[in-house]
Amino acid sequence: MSAEAIVAAAQRLDAAGMMPSKSGNLSVRDGEDVLITPAALPYAQMTPADIVSIDRDGIPAEGAPHRPSSEWRLHAAIYAARSEIGAVVHTHSPRATALSCARRGIPPFHYMVLLAGGPVRCAKHATFGTAALARECVTALADRRAVLLANHGVVAAGATLQAAVTLALEIENLAGQYLDLRAAGLKPVLLTKKELAEAAAQFAHYGR
């Protein structure tokens, strides 16, 4: 996966309102290393030359143009725990972040939660940029591909960068739908395990 693809994905998410005020970060697995967006650089100004290569301890490659994102620990921890993950997208998308501030996840009110592997959990709170946050994220992400971070934002992971971006966008969509239902005073009817299993079976053949 190229630095060009990371920049393109970051700018797409930024244009969609998913990364307010330079928030969030993206990375891809690069062999034993990680390619990650830099700290505090506006996405609209970012170029492929700004992407930082780090090892699993967060040490940038010699001649790195910037400091890596402050959330490099979170990305590195996910890659270390989940060998099938090839890309990680962290956003502060407005609706999902609002839900995270209530420390609530996204229940199975719509079958599209299956894109994340099932109902989306909200990880326990920990300070941003810390090893504690990385641990809480990995724990809540068990057998899932997305998680809300309490009072913080969203993490979406996938085998590819495209899959992680698509999932991040869908989590924001689901959060908005769920909040709209609650705001209207309606109680969502949750899908049963049987109904989710039937939808998962249908997904297995979707698009083939």
Image: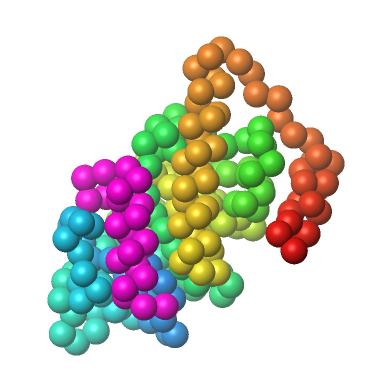
Q: Position of residue 128 (x, y in %)?
A: 31, 51
Q: Residue furthest top?
A: 185
Q: Is residue 7 magenta?
A: yes
Q: Position of residue 137 (x, y in %)?
A: 47, 54
Q: Is residue 49 left or right of residue 26?
A: left
Residue 113 visible in the shown view: yes
Q: In the displayed structure, would residue 10 be above or below residue 123?
A: below
Residue 171 or 103: which is nearer the viewer? 171
- At a point 41% along the width and 58% down the height, the residue shown is 89
Span of residues in magenta: 1-26
Q: Is residue 16 magenta?
A: yes
Q: Main secondary structure of the magenta part?
A: helix
Quadrant the N terminus occupies: bottom left
Q: In the displayed structure, would residue 54 be above or below residue 139?
A: below
Residue 203 or 113: which is nearer the viewer? 203
- At a point 51% along the width and 44% down the height, the residue shown is 171
Q: How is the image coloured?
A: rainbow
How many marks overall? 0
Q: In the displayed structure, would residue 38 be above or below residue 139?
A: below
